[in-house]
Image (cartoon, rainbow, N blue to C red):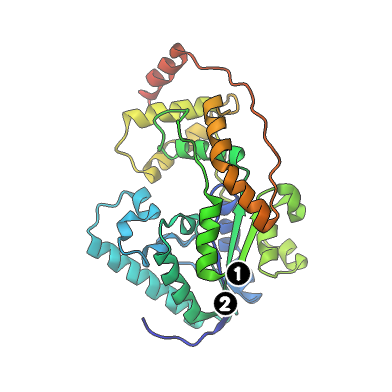
Amino acid sequence: MVAYMKKFEIAYLHIGLDKTGTTAIQSACNHNQAMLEESGVLYPELYPQKRWHAPFGSYFLDDPKSYIWQKERRSTKEIAEVRKEDEDYISALNKQLEISTANRFILSYEGFSMFQKRRPLEKIQKYLAEWAESTVIIMYCREPISYAVSGISQQASSGQLTSAYPKNPPFQSFKRICSDFEHVFGFDNLIVREFKSENFLNKDVRNDFFLQLGLDEDLIDALDYTRENSNSSITKEAIKLACAIRNLNGHMSSGEFRKRYRRILESIKGSKYVLNQQQYKRIIRKSRPHVEYLSKNFNINFEPVEYKTLDEDNDSSNRFFDALAAYF
């Protein structure tokens, strides 16, 4: 890799976490690129994912096809072609960094938190250190029960669920993620925030994110949020229909499924999804050491969430959604 002089003061690596307003933050950064760069913050716009920087992580993996973004694409490309795409992406990023007049830059993708080993993070740290004096990690953490419900909704909307009540609902290993990033980037370079609207300026996570970048409130007030592209949660009925459709169309990629069915699923009225008792107990048990870790190290203390009684679904209801799915 070519050695560059360090022209930036700070490189910000925004790693989500998933279901903490990441899409809204990315959309706001992308839509306000010009104003941000005038204020000293570059948000690179790169093909093929102009709003976010998922391909950046692929470049640093020994097996890029194991990367979460590549898996979601269900790419059939050979490894050599994938590596060529990654190299082109990094080359384009280097060019943007070279010509920018900003003194800080942001790279954002929740998949950066999903590496199973530290080696890719160490490679990313080395790359960013060639450009910036320091790297700061920004991440938001969501209360585990709330995250599980929202995560199931998103998985269903993306065609990733075959059952509306998966035995292993989505779960985030806060302790592992923070420990890995602390090991590579240092504890003092971690900004870990609770995803809770009451904690944010005007109850908006985008405002909070820009405050972490050092932008003043007057500039934040001037940013345009009108083009937000959010991931709305869907109803229990929509989740059941999504699972039934997925069982009939298992060959579809997540992107294809979202493109074809997302608007339909979001339009379906119904009741709010609630975890069943088994799911609830599993999340509480698994999250305990991670919740304690956040409390001890980052003074994040989630409010307890009590179990809500679930109206059990009957077989006739399930058969109805199986039949309905055939029409889609």
Q: Is residue 300 above or below residue 266?
A: below
Tell me the amino acid under the disc marked 2. Answer: Ser
Against 10, is 50 above or below? above
Residue 144 occupies which quadrant of the picture? top right
Dot 1 corresponds to which residue? 189
Q: Which residue is mark 2?
A: 134
Q: How many marks?
A: 2
- Quadrant containing the N terminus is bottom left
- Of the numbered discs 2 and 1, the one sitting upstream in the chain is 2
Q: Nearer the viewer, residue 63 or 197?
A: 63
x then y, percent, for residue 193: 66, 56
The percent position of residue 251, horizontal first and vertical second, equals 29, 38
**Residue ID at (45%, 76%):** 126
Asked if the residue under mark 1 is in contact with the one under mark 2, i.e. CB atoms within 8 Å, the reply is yes
Q: In whole angstroms, how far apart are the C-alphas of marks 2 and 1?
A: 8 Å
Q: Residue at x 60, y 37 (%)?
A: 145
Can the viewer see residue 205?
no
At numbered mark 1, what does the secondary structure look like: helix, strand or loop?
helix
Which amino acid lies under the numbered mark 1 shown in the image of this protein? Asn
State whether residue 18 is above or below residue 328: below
